Amino acid sequence: MEKEKKIVLSGIRATGNLHLGNYFGALQKFVKMQNDYDCRYFVADLHALTTHPDPTKLHENVKDILAEYLAAGLDPEKNIIYVQSDIPEISEMYLLMNMHVGIGELMRTASFKDKARKALGIHSDSDEIEKEIIGNQTNQRVNAGLLTYPTLMAVDILIHHADFVPVGKDQEQHLELTRRFARRFNSFYKTEYFGEPVNFNFGDHAIKVPGLDGSGKMGKSEGNCIYLIDDEKTLRKKVMRAVTDEGPKEPNSPVSEPVNNLFTLMELVSEPDVVKHYRDAYADCSIRYGDLKKQLAEDILKVTLPIRERILDIRNNDEYLSRVVREGAERTREYAARTLADVREIMGIKKF
Ligand code: ADP
Ligand code: TRP
């Protein structure tokens, strides 16, 4: 008997074009997994509403992500590709799952604290966040959707009974919460209904792609991104402007964070002997950062330019995009309806 394939589920929020962090942290894994697993990938437009509620942009953002999925090599014949809001079962199950999620654990989630802090303009610790949120009744800058973001994400995953969830390192806490909610549901209702999904990596750990500004990760809100859609000139300019330092003064000096970030990027896009060449040059102080950056830009372009061309091809083909997501929604709704019916029954919701 043929062994059933493991189920893979992942998604990206519709908040703007995809960058190298999204590509290496998530999308490239999606593509690599499509031949060996039962893969389902979606565009998280409801999640986008927690921070980016803009009715004039949302639909265009959804189309951007879809086109970028397809251009990066996701094959709609091999995967189910859909839009989150096309699946009403997800919203209903989100409501049900929220009955088993504590406000305290949600408020302690790192991504919530981060986003709440930004929305409130607070720089320090969480006590102040709580005081500000609870103390000010008219303060709507931190909405309940943002707080319950992990519930919705858990439902995205559990509604498929997914085994693997390929995401970047920053999403691991959300996955941990998903497992916790699944265990809690099981133990409350004395069932073994939900499994415990895990991240998936081809190496031994989740990737964090750094930005070009010297610290932290590449991220849409940090303004330090190289986008898959960037043209050649823009991309070269961004790489040549990347932050470095004054260069090593003596052999085998430790590598500063900004320069290490460039090496990290290089390890993702360049051949191993190229990386070694520049690492050796750093160690013996002969390195010229200008050369390193030129090489890096060249090697990034080899990855992104073919994708960019396909994005430009697909992005305005509305008929193709809508065919893909219509089929994807139909198939997803079958799975989702089954899970939702089970969950309602387990929770004691009965029809007259
Ligand atoms: P952003 O942080 O730019 O808003 P998202 O939060 O929408 O990006 O992330 C979508 C996916 O891309 C997630 O799986 C996330 O883990 C991954 N990702 C985002 N930025 C990076 C990064 N710099 N390195 C690795 N993975 C990343
Ligand atoms: N939170 C994820 C992000 O910011 C997006 C996401 C929503 C997701 N639901 C998911 C990822 C389910 C994997 C599985 O990138």
Image: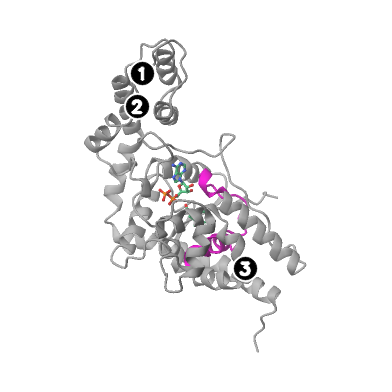
- Tell me the kind of residue under disc 1: Gly
Residue at image x 55%, y 73%? 92
Q: Are marks 1 and 3 in contact (CB under 8 Å)?
A: no
Kind of element beneath mark 2: loop
Question: Looking at the rendering, in which quadrant would you find the C terminus?
Answer: bottom right
Is residue 34 visible to the viewer in this orientation of the structure?
Answer: no
Name the residue carrying label 1. Answer: 247
- Residue 345 in percent (x, y) is at 68, 76
Name the residue carrying label 2. Answer: 244
Q: Earlier in the sequence, mark 3 or mark 2?
A: 2
- Placement of 331 over or under 73, stated as above or below: below
The segment highlighted magenta reads: 145-172
- Tell me the kind of residue under disc 2: Thr
- Residue 152 in percent (x, y) is at 53, 64
- Placement of 71 over or under 13, stated as above or below: above
Q: Earlier in the sequence, mark 1 or mark 3?
A: 1
Q: Nearer the viewer, residue 281 or 341?
A: 281
Please state the total of marks drawn on the protein image.
3
Left or right, 302 with respect to 113, comes to left
For ligand 1, tell me if the residue under mark 2 lies within 8 Å. no
- Tell me the kind of residue under disc 3: Thr
Residue at image x 50%, y 58%? 128
Q: Which mark is residue 339?
A: 3
Left or right, 34 with respect to 318, comes to right
Q: Are marks 1 and 2 in contact (CB under 8 Å)?
A: yes
